[in-house]
Amino acid sequence: MSDNTIIISCHDCDLLQQISHMPEDGSAECPRCGVILRKRQRVQPAKVIEHTLALVITAIVLFCIANAFPIIEVQADGHNMQATLFGCVQYLLSSEMLFLAAVVFFTTIGAPLIQLLGLLYVLLPINYDRVPPYAAQIYRMVRVVGSWSMLEVLMLGILVSVVKLSGMATVIPSISLWTFAVLILVFAAIISDLDKELVWEIISPISSDKIIQNIKDGSQLTNCHNCHLLCDVTGQHDSECPRCGSAVHLRKPDSLTRSTALLMGAIIMYIPANLMPVMVTNSMGNSEGDTIMSGVIYLATGGDIPLAMIIFIASIVVPSMKLIILLILLITVHFKIQWRPKDRTRLYRLTEIVGKWSMVDIFVVTLMAALVQIQGLMVIDVGFGAFAFCSVVVLTILAAMSFDPRLIWDNMEKVNE
C-alpha cells in the first residue's frame, strides 16, 4: 500500500474506501453518499499551525473585549440602559429562568471560550514541537462543544434587536458590537484554516494502517466520530478509540429510540412555542404579549421586510422543517423504506447545519428584556413561549445528534444481500 493511501470509513454511510491521492486545497468525497471525507490545505503543514494559532490568540483578545463592554446602549425618556452579554445571562438568572440562562450562557460564552482556550492549549506547544499533557482529551472536548457555539447566530440576534429597539428609543452601538462582528470573521477563519487531521496526527502517532494490520477475526472497521481514526469493533460490543479515547460503536446505541423520544418532546413543546408569547411588554399599566409570528408581522409592517423574512425563516420555517425531516428519517429507517438514501442523508446533514439558527429569536428576546427595564414606564419580560421555543431548538439538535445516518444505508445493504 502506498504511503499516501488513506483507508477510511464514511461517517455517514459507513462505506469502507481508500483515498490514494488528494490535490492541494482539495477534498475527497464519498462516492456513495456525497459527504466530504477529507480536506487538504494549500498551506505547508508547518505554517498551518502557526497561522491557526495567530488567529486563536486574536480571537481570545476580541472575545475578552466583546464581553467586557456593553453590546448596545439605549436612551429613552432620560433613561440610559446598557447590557453586556453576561448581563443578559444575569437578567435571566434573576428572573429564575435557569434553563434559558444556561443555554444562552453556554452557546454564547461557555462553548466559544472552551473552543478558544482548548485550541490555545493544544496549538501553542505544538507550534514549538511539543505535545501538551491530555492533548487528545482537550482537543476532543473542543470538537464536541464546537457544534454548540452560536456567536454568528447571536450577531444576527443583536442586529434584529437594534432594529426593534430603534422604534422605541435611541440606540447607540457600543465597541462590543463591532468587536463581535470581527470576532465572528476570525472564528470563521479558524474553522476554515484548522487542519483537523494534521492536529490529530501530531497529537497521536497512531494510524489506521496499524489498526488494519492488527485487526482480529470477527472485527469490523468503522470510523471514530470524533477524530476519524479507523477503528476495529468486535460484534456488537463497544470499543474505545486508541487515539482520542471516545467510545466507538458500529452504530449509535439505541439511536432510533433516543431520537424518537427527543423528537416527540420537541413536537409537544412546539405547540406552546408558537401559541404562547415569547416576549411580554408592560407599558403604562398595559401588558401586551408577542408571539413569534406577531414579531415577524411587526417587522414586516414596520418596513423591515428583510429582517422579517430572516426571523420567519429562522424561527418558523427552520424548526418546522427540522421536525418534518427528522420524522421522515425515523419513519423510513424504522419501516426499512428504501426511498432515495442519498437524498435522505443530505436531509440529515441539512438538519445539522441549519438547526442552531433557530436560536435567533431567543437571543433577541433576551437582549431586549435585559435592556428595557424602566419601572413605571416600560418593562419587557421573557414569556413562556421563549422557554418552550428554546426547548424545541435544543431537543431537535439533540435528536439530530442521536440519529445515526448509517442506519439509512444498512437497510439498502440488507436488500442488496
Image (cartoon, rainbow, N blue to C red):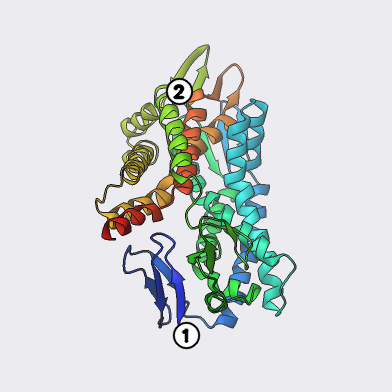
Crowding near the residue tagged with mark 1, few <14, some 14–19, many ≥20 C-alpha atoms within 10 Å: few
**Residue placed farthest to the right in the image?**
133
Residue 277, numbered label: 2
Can residue 156 be seen from the camera position used here? Answer: no
Q: Residue at x 65, y 53 (%)?
A: 65
Describe residue 350's horizontal placement relative to residue 226 as left or right.
left
From this view, report whether residue 362 is shown above or below residue 4: above
Residue 85 visible somewhere in the drawing: yes
Residue at image location 52% in from the left, 18% down from the top: 282
Query: Quick one: 234 or 227, which is closer to the camera?
Result: 234
- Residue 120: give x, y in percent of width and height: 67, 65
Which mark lies nearer to you, 2 or 1?
1
The image shows residue 66, relative to residue 258, as above or below, that is: below
Q: How far apart are marks 2 and 1 (CA)?
A: 58 Å
Q: State which quarter of the image contains the C terminus.
A: bottom left
Front residue of this view, candidates 318 and 12: 12
Considering only vertical position in the picture, is 372 above or below 126? above
Left or right: residue 256 compared with residue 64: left
Which residue is nearer to you in this view: 317 or 38?
A: 38
Q: Residue at x 32, y 36 (%)?
A: 303
Count of all numbered marks drawn on residues in the image:
2
Left or right of residue 307: residue 240? right
Q: Quadrant of residue 48?
A: bottom right
Who comes first in sequence, dot 2 or dot 1? Answer: 1
Identity of the amino acid at label 1? Asn
Residue at x 38%, y 38% (from the top left corner)? 319
Residue on which the image places disc 1: 4
